[in-house]
Image: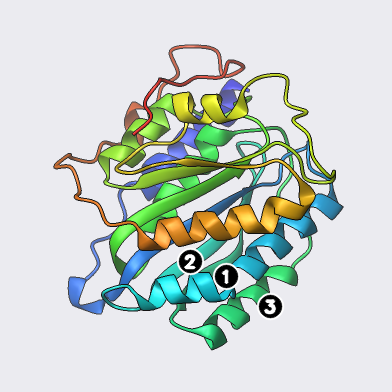
Amino acid sequence: MQIALTYTLAFFIFLANPFVTNAQSLQEVDLELVMLADASGSIDDTEIQFQRQGYAQAIVHPDVLAAIKKGTLQKIAVTFVEWGDDTSQEVVVGWTVIDGLASAERFAKALLKPPRLAFGSNAIGSALGFAHNLIKTNKLDGLRKVIDFSADSANNWSGPPIAAVRQIVLADRITINGLAILCRDCDTGRPIAYNLEKAFKDQIIGGPGSFVITADSKSKFAEAVRRKLVLEIAKRHSIPETRPSSYANLVPKESSKKNNGTLHDR
C-alpha cells in the first residue's frame, strides 16, 4: 500500500506543475465543472448506468439550460469522471463546452455510451486530486471552478488523506460541492449507518457557497442532480485571496485506512 501511495503522490506532483499555457489560447466560460461520480465497489454496473442517466437527464433539462443562458458568457464547460480506488479515476466524457440544447444533448449521449471504467474501494482524496488537476491542466478560463462530488460514503481507504487534498483544492480557488447518495435502487430510505450529509460537510465540501444535496430515493436522483447543477451554474461569489499549494506536501500523518478530514462547511 505504501508503494501505491508513493506512486499516487508522484502522479499528483507531476500534474500539479503543468507547462505554462498562453492565456490568450484559453477559452473563456462562466464555469468549469468536474462531475466526479462514485464508481467504487459499493456500486454495481446497473447503478453506474443509473447515475449516468441522472446526469444525462439533468444536463438537458430546461432549468439547467436556462441557468447557463443567464451567465455572463452563456456557456459552461463540464467533464464527467468516475472514481474508485487510488489507481482508478477515469474520464468518461472529456471537457465539453455547453452553450445550448444541442451541445448538452451531445454530452448526454456521450455519457451513456462507455462501459464501466473505474473500480476499487473508496479513494476520495485521489479523486479530488484528479479533478483538481483536470481543472489546472485544461485549456479553459472559467470565471468559477467547481468540483461536483457525489458518493454514498465518506470513507477514504487508500491514497492521500482527504483533508490534505481538500486544502490544496480550496487554496486554488476551486469550490467543492457534494451530492450525498443515501439510496439509488429503492423507493426511499437512509441505509447509511451514519449521517452522510454531515460527513460531507465536515470532511469534503468547501469554498464560497459550498453545499450538500441529498438523493434519498431512486425517483428523486435525477431531480437532485438537476437542482445541484442549477445551483452550481447560478452561483455568484467573491473569490478569497489565497495561494495554491503543492501535492508535494501530501505525506499522510495518519494511516490511509482512516477517514481523514477536517470540519469546514463554507
Front residue of this view, candidates 2 and 202: 202
SS of the residue under disc 2 = strand
Q: State the residue at coordinates (65%, 33%).
A: 122
Amino acid type assigned to the residue bearing label 3 in the image? Lys
Mark nearer the N terminus (1 vs 2) = 1
Is label 1 in contact with label 2 (beta carbons under 8 Å)?
Answer: yes
Amino acid type assigned to the residue bearing label 2 in the image? Val
| Residue 90 in view of the camera | no
Amino acid type assigned to the residue bearing label 1 in the image? Ile
Q: Which residue is mark 3?
A: 109
Q: Which residue is mark 2?
A: 78
Q: Between tags 3 and 1, which lies in front? A: 1
Q: Which residue is mark 1?
A: 59
When asked about the image quadrant of residue 108, the answer is bottom right
Q: Between tags 1 and 2, which lies in front? A: 1
Give the residue at the far top of this rendering. 254
| Residue 63 in view of the camera | yes
